[in-house]
Image (cartoon, grey):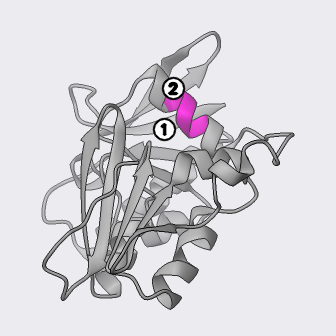
Amino acid sequence: MRFFVLADMEGNITDFFHAQKLIIYEKTMQWVPVDEVKIVNTQNMTRSEIENLSQNICTIIKEQDSEMLIGTEIVGIPYQILNKNGIIMCETDGISQNIFDEIYDDFYNTFEDEEVQVEDAPPYPVCVAEDGFYYFDFDKAMKVHPTLSSKKRLIPFLEQELYTCLTIRCSHIMPWLEYYTEQHGLSMDYKREDGVYIVNIMHGLCERVGEYNG
């Protein structure tokens, strides 16, 4: 299993538009960097150049029999092209053995007993306070209900439910989420606490953010 990480010249994880190379991590006993591939990424790229770079990154990843790209931010045209080519994208502020393991568990591990603690891990957001405040523990739900993707869990809620604020607890931010909220006029903010993200999504007209930390 190989993961590709967007990195700057010093090897620090970065976003798509500041990446200068892809560092390839592979797990033996631990996740270790096994190779890196330099990419040509300049400021003020044209749309065509962005599309070509995105496509080249897709090719590089697939040539290594991988499908996982990790960065601090992957949005816009790069996200659309990578997603269309079947690349799985994860956003995180940093990388570590635990983060890699969590990403692997979320996307590649299967859980034989889906009934364990089902009552403690609902597959969809639940109302936790009056006036439409909802909470969703994505990581716990993923382990109990691994067959449901993040889009299947959240998009029906976001499009059909009357809510004031949805708070999501997750180890990494779903790569499609920020783009989706922007396109649908929703407000989104997040912070990192004790190694996990707390994401708040609310309607653009809402001025007060409610948060439930479980």
Q: Quarter holding the N terminus? A: top right
Tell me what residue is drawn at x 48 percent, y 38 percent. Answer: 4
| Residue 70 drawn at (x, y percent) | 43, 44
Tell me what residue is drawn at x 29 percent, y 76 percent. Answer: 202
Tell me what residue is drawn at x 81 percent, y 47 percent. Answer: 114
Distance CA(mark 2)–CA(mark 1): 6 Å
Circle 1: element type? strand
Q: Which residues are magenta?
A: 100-104
Residue highlighted by disc 1:
4
- Looking at the rendered structure, the kind of residue marked 2 is Tyr
Front-lying residue, 185 or 4: 185
Magenta: main secondary structure: helix
Circle 2: element type? strand
Mark 2 is surrounded, within 10 Å at the Cα level, by few (under 14), some (14 to 19) or many (20 or more) other residues, namely some
Residue highlighted by disc 2:
25
156 in relation to 169, above or below? below
| Residue 130 drawn at (x, y percent) | 36, 75
Residue 101 part of the magenta segment = yes
> In this rendering, would 161 be left or right of 67?
left
Residue 37 part of the magenta segment = no
Q: Tell me where residue 135 sits by quadrant.
A: bottom left
